[in-house]
Image (spheres, rainbow, N blue to C red):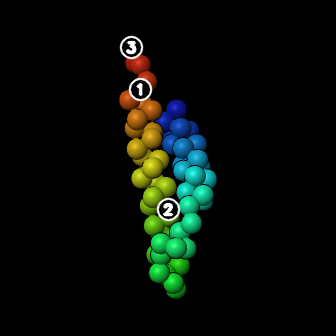
């Protein structure tokens, strides 16, 4: 349960952080669906990396 809550929190933070980037200069025009997919994939990749890192720091008995 902790992992799911952490993943959702980090995913929301990843979307918020990616919103700071100006993707308009990086992407081609008229490729909206591909740009949205890239945005989601980047957010999921960031989420996976951060959650795995944070769970690796957790001390278990």
Question: Does residue 9 appear left or right of residue 48 in this picture?
Answer: right
Question: Does residue 25 appear left or right of residue 52 in this picture?
Answer: right
The answer for how far apart the CA atoms under marks 3 and 2 are is 35 Å
Query: In what element is the residue under mark 2?
Result: helix
**Residue 50: quadrant of the picture:** top left
Is residue 61 or residue 36 the one in the foreground? 36
The residue carrying mark 2 is: 40
The residue drawn where x is 55% and y is 73% is 24
Of all residues, the one furthest to the front in this rendering is 25
The residue drawn where x is 54% and y is 50% is 14
The answer for how far apart the CA atoms under marks 2 and 1 are is 26 Å
The residue drawn where x is 52% and y is 32% is 2
* Rendering coords of residue 60 (x, y %): 40, 18
Q: Is residue 33 above or below residue 52?
A: below
The answer to whether the residue labelled 1 contacts the one labelled 3, judged by CB atoms less than 8 Å apart, is no
> Which-is-in-front pick, marks 1 and 3?
1
Query: In what element is the residue under mark 3?
Result: loop
* Rendering coords of residue 48 (x, y %): 42, 46
The residue carrying mark 3 is: 61
* Rendering coords of residue 46 (x, y %): 45, 49
**Dot 3, crowdedness within 10 Å: few (<14), some or many (≥20)?**
few
Labels 3 and 2: the sequence-earlier one? 2
Q: Is residue 43 above or below residue 33?
A: above
Q: Is residue 2 above or below residue 43?
A: above
The residue carrying mark 1 is: 57
Is residue 60 or residue 47 the one in the foreground? 47
The answer for how far apart the CA atoms under marks 1 and 3 are is 13 Å
* Rendering coords of residue 41 (x, y %): 44, 61
Q: Is residue 6 visible?
A: yes
């Amino acid at each position: 349960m902790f992992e799911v809550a952490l993943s959702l929190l980090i995913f929301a933070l990843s979307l918020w952080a990616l919103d700071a980037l100006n993707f308009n200069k990086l992407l081609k025009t008229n490729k909206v669906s591909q740009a949205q997919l890239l945005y989601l994939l980047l957010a999921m990749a960031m989420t996976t990396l951060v959650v795995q890192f944070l769970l690796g720091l957790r001390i278990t008995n």
